[in-house]
Image (cartoon, rainbow, N blue to C red):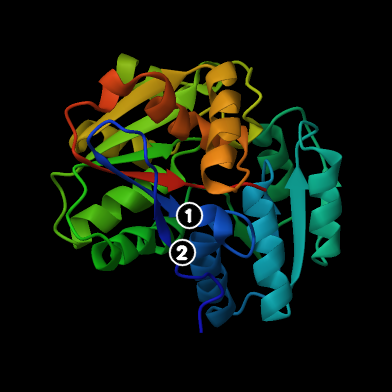
Amino acid sequence: MPLYVKTPIIDLHLGQGRTVQCKMEAYQPSGSFKLRGIENLMKRALADGAERFVSSSGGNAGLSAAYAGRKLGMGVTVVVPQTTPPFIVGRLEEEGAKATVHGESWDEAHTYALSLINKNTAYVPPFDHPKLWEGHATIVDELKQQCTEKPDLIVLSVGGGGLLCGVVEGLVRNGWENTHILAVETGGAASLYKSVQEGRLVTLTAIESIATSLGAKKVTAKALEYAQQYNVTPYLVTDEAAMRACVLFADASRTLVEPACGASLSVLYDDPRITETYRNIVVIVCGGA
């Protein structure tokens, strides 16, 4: 049995003559879509002889690794940056993980986590691994069963690009390659947007956004490759728009999500012109940890 759950889709009524459905990944046991890919990676590593896991995270990936480790009966160390809220550190410890705070950004936490790896320990990155993308692609497998019509637009948030890669791979394996993707970031965490603009991987000097779950200074190279190869449009919103969308979505759905997730939702609330040419829209409500 998988550790992740098949999440529902709910209608979002915006009165714009379109079908908007939300794929509620915030309902995963760990609080985000990350569990799909991390479970896949950890189970593969266990089959290859791993005895312990180390992860680095801005929050959601670590919570998923900690949850999966507890369910699988394996020890997990999670390295988080100083921007991680104390309550997240507490939740990691409640799941039985060892939480270590290191560095001012995820990139520094990631470097330190790599130094903890030995021959019996497997590293669980938050977004940059094919097994993660393979697991995240199950979101589209479920949409294929749940949607009465093929979506012509999927809206999702981008941090390091793992969700984007998984959704692209899911679209391809389900024959939905012509479905467009709107890849949303906040202006202070725009690593994909700037990379697509310049046609090369760009490393940000700093993360300047309240949406700390989007706080990767550089996206995975595969995310840039997929953005250039498929129907992917990068898009930026403000922190204020992301936070406002969290409040509006809580009123509409009785579910509180974090600003990283609000970034995607804000596109629907703030500027309908961005999506006005699409009739069947799915938003990945990625998490609320």
Give the residue drawn at x 84%, y 45%: 87
Q: Position of residue 13 (x, y in %)?
A: 37, 40
Q: Position of residue 273 (x, y in %)?
A: 27, 19
Q: Quadrant of residue 63?
A: bottom right
Contact, CB < 8 Å: mark 1 with mark 2?
A: yes
187, above or below 262, in the image = above
Q: Position of residue 38 (x, y in %)?
A: 55, 62
Residue 7's disc number: 2
Q: Secondary structure at mark 2?
A: loop
Left or right of 101, for residue 127: left
Classify mark 2: residues with Cα within 10 Å, few (<14), some (14-19) or many (20+).
Answer: some
Residue under numbered circle 1: 24
Q: Quadrant of residue 42?
A: bottom right
Residue at the front extreme, as displayed? 15
Q: Position of residue 224 (x, y in %)?
A: 33, 33
Q: Amino acid at mark 1?
A: Met
Q: Secondary structure at mark 1?
A: strand
